[in-house]
Amino acid sequence: MKLNIHLRYNTYGLKQVTIAVVVAIAFMVTLFFGNKAEAVKGEACNISTNNAIANQARQIVDELRLELAGVENQIRNHPYLTALENGQVSQDNLKAFTGEEYNIVKSDIRSNRLLVRRFGRTRSGKYFRDILSGEVQALDFLLDFATALNLNEDDLKKYEPLPGGQAFPAYVASLALSGSQAEVAAAYLLNFPIFGENTGRMSAALQKQYGFTPKDTAFFDFFASPVPSFECDSLNVIATGLKRGAEPRLIKRAARLLQAYEKLFWDTVGEN
């Protein structure tokens, strides 16, 4: 809120009193709307502040963000991104990057189909169906980027992926097979934003330094565009999992390991 107040008084004392009143009113208005905003946020997430399980889900995520801040900064500031922004990444490397991502996305599609089979009939069903739908769409965008690199899908199928690049989807597959829905949702909630940050930077660098078009880089922009309800939806899935006996220790482990494998992916493509 911006208040345009033009006051003229003949005495210094009256002016000071008036300013004090304005400041007090502004503070009260800010406090009111701030509290209202917090209430709306809680309502949008459909999480009651009196719900112990919901509060536990939020606490786990908050703790994870603190605990994983270090590795997230390493991912966010990875030398591979700097090299790309300086035009120092070769076409062969970009082709290898695409080959790694092709294998990752194909594996993640299989994993998320399994999650839909496991949880599709529960309250968390839509969450996992939406993620599966997104992965399928991402594959089409990745093929567009491959075409811009003069690669077709047969070329991508022939690419031999590296172990460090595929540790991430291998762990997702393990979670899909035997992890709780809370473990998966926490791992996704912590991982997707940082991956999106990096792909957003990649899209900008690929267009600026390498001449790719927005259509070519749609794969990167797709992950860089956050889903507004994703955090609330993830928290609700975590809370549902906790109600069904998911262990906080294992929820944290899933997020920690997936983020570590995310870093390993960037290390691997940077050395490729």
Image (cartoon, rainbow, N blue to C red):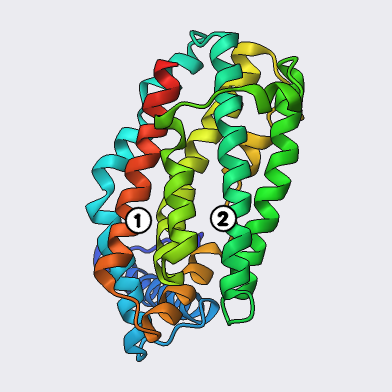
Above or below, 269 relative to 243:
above
Q: In which quadrant of the rendered view does residue 127 lie?
A: bottom right
Tag 2: Cα neighbours inside 10 Å, few (<14), some, or many (≥20)? many
Above or below, 14 relative to 269:
below
Q: Position of residue 153 (x, y in %)?
A: 75, 28
Above or below, 97 relative to 31:
above
Q: Position of residue 218 (x, y in %)?
A: 70, 35
Q: Position of residue 175 (x, y in %)?
A: 44, 59
Report the front residue among 111 and 149: 111
Report the front residue among 51 and 15: 51
Q: Residue furthest bottom?
A: 50
Which residue is pictured at 42% across the width and 70% down the height? 180
Q: Position of residue 171 (x, y in %)?
A: 42, 49
Please report whichever mark, 1 or 2, sits nearer to the chain's N-terminal start.
Answer: 2
Q: Quadrant of the C terminus?
A: top left
Amino acid type at circle 1 is Ala
Which residue is pictured at 60% across the width and 26% down the height? 99
Amino acid type at circle 2 is Ser
Q: Which residue is mark 2?
A: 111
Residue 113 shows in the view: yes
Give the secondary structure at mark 1. Answer: helix
Give the secondary structure at mark 2. Answer: helix
Which residue is pictured at 51% across the width and 82% down the height? 46
Task: Give the mark toward the camera: 1 or 2.
Answer: 2
Separation of marks 1 and 2 at Cα, in angstroms? 16 Å
Tag 1: Cα neighbours inside 10 Å, few (<14), some, or many (≥20)? many
In the visual, does 53 lie left or right of 136? left
Q: Are marks 1 and 2 in contact (CB under 8 Å)?
A: no
Q: Which residue is mark 1?
A: 255
Q: In which quadrant of the rendered view does residue 107 lie?
A: top right
